[in-house]
Amino acid sequence: MEDTRTLRFFNRGPSAVARLVFFSVLSLALLFVDAKYNYLESARQVIAVIIYPLQRLTALPGEVWNGAGEYIRLQRHLVAENEQLHLQHDADAALLNQMQSLQAENAQLRELLDVTRRADYTMQMAQIAYVERDIFKRKLFIDKGENTNVQAGQAVVDNGGVVGQITRVYPLLSEVTLVTDKDIAVPIQVVRNGIRAVVFGSGNISELELRYQPVNADIEVGDVLVTSGMDGTYPPALPVAQVIKVERDPAYPFARIVCAPLAGVDRHRTLLIVSSVPPLPERPVAEAESDEAQRVKKLVKRSKP
Amino acid sequence: MRQDLARDREFLLPATTTFIVLSFFIAVLLEWMPWRGWMLALRPDFVGLVLLYWCTHKPHRVGIGIAWMLGIFVDVADASLFGQHALAYSVLAFGGLVLNRRVQMFNLREQSVHVFALLLTSYSVYAIVHWQVRGFVAWEYFLGVVTSALLWIPLTHLLQALRRPRRDPNEL
């Protein structure tokens, strides 16, 4: 009996408990390294490339279903849609003409005021490859990655407004964290009165929160929030959200302001990657700078008489 | 009970490596289907279930090491932290290995209660890691344990049926 036991022991390697301990420690070490540092990004990218075909395969049924639906759509619908689009086009063309003249005028005015021109940002189309399947997070993957020069930090928008931000770039894919994710914050400005604030994701797909506003803040239901562009990440004046509920309870120091995202955060298949604005000038170092300035002033004073 | 035992001890084809790999492959594909909203919360943990099946029925073939590697792949696909699924699946596989003789004593309905407990542990490990790192827990996540435990019975039937030899070679 003992013989077989020892034989078994050698045949099967370490016991289950030893293995559990080994792999748990390994997982915990990986967890710690991944949570604190960014050393594992390259390993992640390698595995991401390996499993990329599998992921496309899982998205295939949905794509085929959509494609078939598109194919079956009636000619009549297309004709009607086409007609409507033509009308829209004509209307838009008139507006566009108007806008061109306005733009020219604006450029002229800016020149008069000697303000630096706002940089025009470049855009890139991308398709949603697949949507995050983890209930804890609001993320999706798009089919443009390092191969088309996407960079982490770029903003992602659709026709309604800001959808999210690129948080991780793989060789063929990139990961977009939606504005409704709990970990994301977007600096915004209220269109109506220019109040600057920061809007936070709530973790709920259809809600954002405008936190840390005093109870008497001038924010009303229906206010549109646009990016302020002050962070150097989001280009300015992209619509982000609309206020849908304001609770002013004097028992709390801050008002509870709930907003709904203006972009179809969970609707479209095609999105736009917007290149971030050119880097802002370095932030002045407050202490050292002021010391230096004072010293210069003193020197000037001394040299005067 | 005796009938169930008899059926459990029926002659089954040896599980080939191809069959095991294929079962994991299909489980992973099911897991990565575009689930969303409440469907996502109710989604059974297919990979965990198949892993548990093999850990209880073929404990010498599939163990903690394979569970851990599967976990790493799922971590990358789900963009969760490295090691989060790996840790949860390691714990699950350990539970399956330790309880494999005990679980096989019971009939399927009683087995699914065991499966419920094991999956609850594994889900808790995942949620605790998330809570420690990110600071919150989505409670509807645990609904997946219930649907997974319910899925245990059909899944076991399916895998047993696929491993059962055909009496007549011409039978479909």
Image (tube, helix red, strand yellow):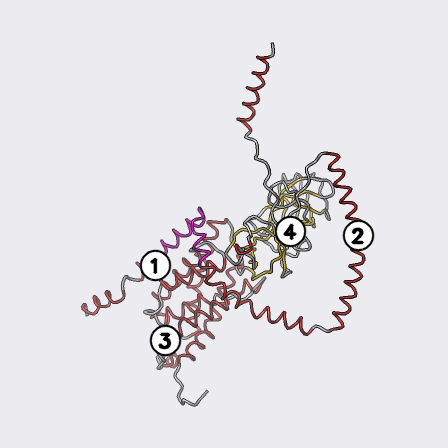
Secondary structure of the residue carrying tag 3 is loop
The residue labelled by disc 1 is: A20
Residue B91 placement: quadrant: bottom left
Q: Is residue A88 left or right of residue A246?
A: right
- Count the labels in the image: 4
Discs 1 and 4 share one subunit: yes
Q: What is the distance, in whole Å, between disc 4 and disc 2 at their CAs? A: 23 Å
Query: For the stretch drawn in magenta, what is the main secondary structure?
Result: helix
Label 1 neighbour load within 10 Å: few <14, some 14-19, many 20+: many
Same chain check for tags 4 and 2: yes
Give percent across and percent down for residue B124: 45, 57
- Report helix, strand or loop for mark 4: strand
- Which element type, helix, strand or loop, lies under badge 1? helix
Taking A224 as reference, is A54 left or right?
Answer: left
Height in image: B81 above or below B44? Answer: above
Q: Which residue is mark 4?
A: A162
Q: Position of residue A93 (x, y in %)?
A: 79, 55
Q: Are marks 3 and 1 on the same chain?
A: no
Quarter of image, res A305: top right
Q: Are marks 2 and 1 on the same chain?
A: yes
Q: Can you identify the residue that label 2 sits on? A: A95
Binning the other alpha carbons within 10 Å of mark 2 as few (below 14), some (14 to 19) or many (20 upward) gives few
Residue type, numbered disc 2: Leu
User: Which secondary structure, mark 2?
Assistant: helix
